[in-house]
Image (spheres, rainbow, N blue to C red):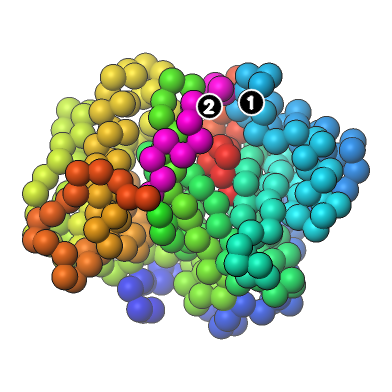
């Protein structure tokens, strides 16, 4: 068992963030999935990414996730633009740019995939790319209410949310996010952390603090229910399928949005630390000096698209 977490089987990878080991792992994972992941450099390739993302998010013309011109500029300036290929077909893509502090961070702006395994292969390629350049962290934003993205980011990748950002992007004109407020969590992926190395080797991360945690937000008859608890670690539930709920019952979706903002955002604003995701809930360790039972009154501080192809948007925008 590592500090704060538990291994759930699988091989134990080399410790630390070795770029060579990360590269070998990324290539092996892609090959096992029948995929090839590579950086993109040509206008034709960038145009294909635009088409791929259009098929996932169906954005309004004025609000694409990213344009071909911007990808061209980012690639030329040393940013990260990569695609996952199944034979000749582009089945996933990821776009990121260098961020502050200089020389330490890559911000992964948007990732989308339409084939199982492509998102994970892209993230491992991105990790190896960052480590080769001496970077120590990758950040991205994601919708805290989309359960499968939370599982992917916190369990499969062992990233950690470090900031709650209410209505971060404002109104978003696409088929997945329209009509909702764009709250986001800022995920931080510490590339050399032992838990991250294990996750990249296929060992999911589960925080030990999930055992015996109290419930701060749960579900009753499909709606959010806020509970009071003095437990040092608490669980904050999210709906099983926020995207479907947003389409079929906007009022209940809005209730969940505001409840998660109040409880999860409030806990984080008070110094609570999100240590993982288990059984459809965020696991949050309260700040030891925090007020007993205080959940706060507000916040501090994409996946599966309908339409032509079933896709996975890992936050939109998001990593």
Residue interval drawn in magenta: 164-177
Q: Is residue 146 visible?
A: no
Given contact means CB atoms under 8 Å apart, are the residues at marks 1 and 2 in contact? Answer: yes
Does the magenta stretch mainly form a helix, a strand or a loop?
A: loop
Q: Is residue 134 visible?
A: yes
Per the image, is 169 magenta?
yes
Location of residue 180 in the rendering, given as x and y in whole percent from the top left corner: 41, 25
Residue under label 2, please give it. Answer: 172
Of residue 10 and residue 291, the one placed in the foreground of this image is 291
Q: Quick one: which residue is furthest to the top in this view?
A: 248
- Mark 1 neighbour class, 10 Å CA radius: few under 14, some 14 to 19, many 20 or more: few
Disc 2, SS: loop
Residue at the spot 42% in from the left edge and 65% down from the top edge: 205
Of pointers 1 and 2, the one earlier in the residue sequence: 1
Residue under label 1, please give it. Answer: 63
Q: Quadrant of residue 116?
A: top right
Location of residue 68 in the rendering, given as x and y in whole percent from the top left corner: 80, 35
Location of residue 118 in the rendering, given as x and y in whole percent from the top left corner: 66, 47
Residue at the spot 26% in from the left edge and 28% down from the top edge: 255
């Amino acid at each position: 068992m590592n500090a704060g977490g538990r291994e759930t089987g699988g091989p134990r990878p080399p410790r630390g963030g070795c770029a060579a080991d990360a590269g070998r792992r990324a290539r092996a994972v892609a090959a096992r999935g029948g995929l090839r992941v590579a950086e993109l450099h040509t206008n034709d390739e960038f145009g294909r990414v635009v088409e791929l993302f259009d098929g996932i998010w169906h954005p309004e013309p004025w609000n694409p996730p990213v344009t071909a011109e911007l990808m061209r500029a980012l690639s030329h300036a040393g940013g990260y633009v990569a695609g996952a290929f199944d034979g000749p077909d582009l089945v996933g893509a990821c776009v990121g740019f260098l961020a502050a502090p200089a020389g330490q961070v890559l911000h992964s702006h948007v990732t989308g995939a339409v084939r199982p395994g492509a998102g994970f292969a892209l993230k491992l390629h991105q990790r190896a790319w960052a480590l080769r350049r001496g970077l120590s962290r990758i950040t991205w934003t994601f919708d805290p209410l989309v359960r499968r993205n939370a599982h992917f980011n916190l369990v499969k990748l062992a990233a950690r949310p470090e900031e709650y950002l209410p209505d971060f992007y404002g109104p978003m004109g696409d088929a997945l996010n329209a009509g909702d407020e764009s709250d986001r969590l800022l995920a931080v992926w510490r590339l050399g952390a032992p838990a991250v190395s294990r996750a990249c080797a296929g060992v999911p991360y589960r925080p030990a603090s999930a055992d015996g945690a109290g419930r701060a937000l749960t579900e009753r008859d499909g709606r959010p229910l806020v509970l009071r608890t003095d437990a040092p670690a608490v669980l904050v539930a999210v709906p099983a399928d926020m995207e479907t709920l947003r389409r079929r019952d906007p009022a209940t979706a809005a209730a969940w949005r505001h409840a998660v903002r109040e409880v999860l955002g409030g806990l984080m604003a008070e110094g609570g630390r999100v240590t993982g995701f288990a059984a459809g809930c965020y696991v949050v360790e309260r700040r030891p000096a925090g007020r007993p039972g205080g959940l706060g009154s507000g916040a501090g501080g994409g996946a599966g698209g309908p339409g032509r192809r079933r896709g996975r948007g890992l936050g939109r925008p998001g990593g």
